[in-house]
Amino acid sequence: MKCVFITSDQMLVQGNLPTSSGVLLSKNERASEQPSNIKQTYEVYDHAIFVNGASSQLKGMVSLFGILLLATIPLFWWDFLGDDIDSLLSAVKRNDEFSIIFSIVIILVNFGLWVFCFTNGIRALRFDLLSPKRIPIIFNRKTKKFYVFIVETPDSYDFRPREILKTFMPWSAFVIGYDWANIEAILSEKLIATSSTSARKRYFVELYAKENPDSSKIIGRFLLTPPFVGKETCLNYWEYVRRYMEEGGEAVLPKDKLAPAIPRNVFQAAQVFLPYVWPLILFGAVFSIYFYWDKGSPLSYFGKYNLIVGFVAFVSSLSVMAIFFNWVGHRLGSGLEIPKSILDDIGNRIKSVDQAWSSV
């Protein structure tokens, strides 16, 4: 996939730096004494590192969301839309104006839901399975630049015909170059519900690109850390990037490993998606399939453990599907064509995890 190069001076102002939404991390002060690439760096050059802008472990999850959306289409089309048309025809025969208006509104709502599920289901599958295998963030400490790659996708909630048609048209990619001097990092927290009565804090580091070092106006914002990680992990990763760019820190620390290589088969995809625990997940899925095939639902055979067995069957089956889509996505995904102007400044490649299926 070809990338269009955009410089930071072409970007529009998006607002002010949100210093009140989190903790501002200084580029001149250490945030952690244990810097780590947390297995996000996948290529090392003389003057630059390539880190994951989108985790390869999450590939496959979006496809599950797309499948679920597409699975609801018959529900809206046959059960709801069919009955609503019958209700409309019946109201017309009775000359009941209120029922006619009500039926038309329900038909339009259900048709809108059908369009939403269809277009976003296709978009989810397309983005997950046909997007680039790796979407990098590049940090170049020689030029003090960093580059963000973005795949332009249609707006999920824009139902104008032109936007809907973009679902089936080629999507473009572009790369934006920013000056490291204009970057600010903010550590934020978010509550993630773990059940109906409990929640857990999750942290993330966002990079904000300012117009210039002294400005508070931002022209871009990007997530640096993977989702659903702890505070210490966020600080360690930011410290790794900060030291690399500010202090000439090592590209790969002695205790660190590079990111997982792109999987070449389903078993490697399983190791990337669910390291070390995937055999248990596979066993749970096979167990569920056997019971459904031989004896029907397993829920009626385990008494007070019915809910646990049902939960295991559900999670393991979804996980196996996600592993499969992870493999398919890496097989079908394209490569990003890095602009020559960026490659000319990074020097020779020293390490690349994708040269072989191994950690360096």
Image (cartoon, rainbow, N blue to C red):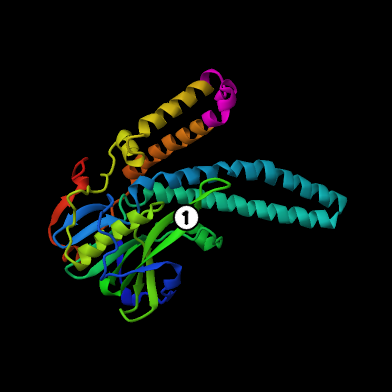
Magenta portion: prevailing SS class: helix
Other-residue count near label 1 (Cα within 10 Å), few / some / many at <14 / 14–19 / ≥20: many
Can residue 65 be seen? Answer: yes
In terms of secondary structure, where does tag 1 sit? helix
Picture coordinates of residue 36 (x, y %)? 25, 54
Q: Residue furthest top?
A: 294
What residue is at 68 percent from the left and 55 percent from the top? 108
Q: Is residue 173 above or below residue 64?
A: below
Q: Is residue 206 magenta?
A: no
What residue is at 28 percent from the left and 44 percent from the top? 262
Badge 1 is on which residue?
A: 167
Q: Nearer the viewer, residue 199 or 183?
A: 199
Side (left or right) of 243 relative to 19: left
Q: Nearer the viewer, residue 329 or 168?
A: 329
Side (left or right) of 155 relative to 277: right
Three-letter residue code for mark 1: Thr
Q: Is residue 158 above or below residue 271?
A: below
Q: How many numbered marks, from 0 up?
A: 1
Q: Nearer the viewer, residue 94 or 17?
A: 17
Q: Residue furthest bottom?
A: 214
Picture coordinates of residue 67 (x, y %)? 50, 42
Residues in magenta, as a range? 293-310
Can residue 18 be seen? Answer: no
Q: Is residue 301 magenta?
A: yes
Picture coordinates of residue 250 (x, y %)? 17, 58
* Quadrant including the C terminus: top left
Picture coordinates of residue 109 (x, y %)? 67, 54
Side (left or right) of 193 relative to 54: right
Quadrant for residue 332, please give it.
Answer: top left
What residue is at 36 percent from the left and 33 percent from the top? 278
Q: Is residue 114 above or below residue 208?
A: above
